[in-house]
Image: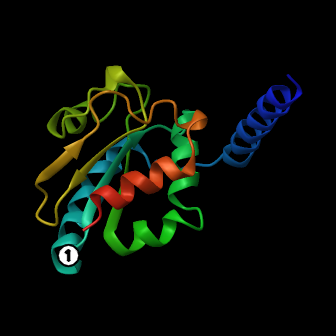
Amino acid sequence: MKPIKYLALAALLTISALQARSAGRAIYPEPAQAKTDLAAALKTAAASHKRILLDFGGNWCPDCQALDLYFHDAVNRPILEANFLLVHVNIGHMDANVDLAEEYGIPLHRGVPAVAVLDEQGKLLYSQTSGEFEDMRNMASSDVTRFLRQWKR
């Protein structure tokens, strides 16, 4: 029984640490910036032969904050930087950039964060349609690592 209590305490402390580290971080730019950022990423992707990773979410979202921390940890950052251009798409409170979410097959009603992967020409390769990352604060960095490795170039 004691090991279960210690495991539960460790999980709680990890979640608390993630929330504390992410508090006040503005990851997502103003919603109006999304189309400009995507256009710039499309130009860069064509020249650099990298894929585009669209991250739909909001600064208010603790799971979105956790995903960004995992994207930039020591294991995932090199995979991300070598293979992807990351574009943060601010969805406001599920009321902004809804058109982009629809265009790339992201059902916002399933929750955020949600990601889509585009090839270097902007063709949709994959979109999360079942809220796969919506509970990111209860997931591990290794889940993000698996995803990045699966979709890297």
On screen, residue 152 versus residue 102, left or right, reads right
Q: In which quarter of the image is residue 111?
A: top left
On screen, residue 19 versus residue 79, left or right, reads right
Residue sitting at 37 percent across and 29 percent down? 131
Q: Quadrant of residue 132?
A: top left
On screen, residue 33 versus residue 48, left or right, reads right
Colour pattern of the rendering: rainbow
54 shown above or below 45? above
Query: Which residue sits furthest right?
Result: 2
Residue sitting at 47 percent across and 37 percent down? 58
Between residue 39 and residue 150, name the one nearer to us: 150
Residue sitting at 76 percent across and 43 percent down? 17
Helix, strand or loop at mark 1: loop
Q: What is the quadrant of the C terminus in the image?
A: bottom left
State the residue position of label 1. 49
Query: Which residue sits furthest front?
Result: 1
Residue 70, percent from left and from top: 55, 53
